Image (cartoon, rainbow, N blue to C red):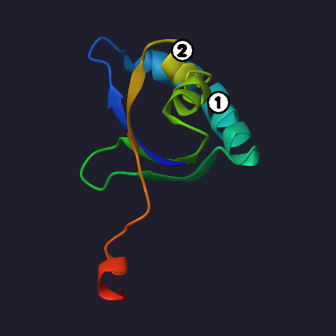
Amino acid sequence: MKIIALEKEISTAKTIDFRKNAKAEAKALWNLYQNGIVREFYFRKEKKLAVLILETKNKEDAKKSLSKLPYVSKKLIEFELIPLKPYPGFQRLFK
């Protein structure tokens, strides 16, 4: 299942905490990428928040995988998870 994960910064997070954990965060994200869980990653254009595309069995697996990220486990950020499904609209055209 493809899932879009939209980052939300937690209001109590401090810049220093992001800086202290940046290398560990990058390494953890790289590991998720290498394991085929995170397929793509971006920043939103209008603000510096991450958008991840994941491939997992279900939403719960995505949440569990993202919980391994230091920024998540240290409660600096959280993710809104949006499961996707294939677009079925074309079948109406070809019946």
Q: Is residue 16 above or below residue 32?
A: above
Residue count near mark 2 (Cα–Cα under 10 Å), binned few <14, some 14–19, many ≥20: few
Residue at x-position 59% and y-position 30%: 61
Residue count near mark 1 (Cα–Cα under 10 Å), binned few <14, some 14–19, many ≥20: few
**The residue under label 2 is which amino acid type?**
Ser
Residue at x-position 47% and y-position 16%: 17
Left/right placement of residue 41 relative to residue 37 reads: left
Asked whether 62 or 85 is in front, the reply is 85
Left/right placement of residue 83 relative to residue 31 reads: left
For discs 2 and 1, the disc positioned in front in the rendered view: 2
Q: Measured from the top left, where is residue 67 in percent x and y?
A: 56, 21
Q: Measured from the top left, where is residue 71 in percent x and y?
A: 51, 22
View extreme (bottom): residue: 94
Residue at x-position 27% and y-position 45%: 47
SS category of the residue bearing label 2: helix
Q: Measured from the top left, where is residue 32 in percent x and y?
A: 68, 39
Asked whether 8 or 61 is in front, the reply is 61
Residue, disc 2: 73
Residue, disc 1: 23
Q: Quadrant for the C terminus, please.
A: bottom left
View extreme (front): residue: 95
**The residue under label 1 is which amino acid type?**
Lys
SS category of the residue bearing label 1: helix
Asked whether 32 or 82 is in front, the reply is 82
Q: Is residue 86 above or below residue 72?
A: below
Q: Is residue 90 above or below residue 46?
A: below
Q: Measured from the top left, where is residue 76 in percent x and y?
A: 42, 18
Q: Is residue 87 above or below residue 63?
A: below
Q: CA distance from mark 2 to mark 1?
A: 15 Å
2 or 1: tag closer to the N-terminus:
1
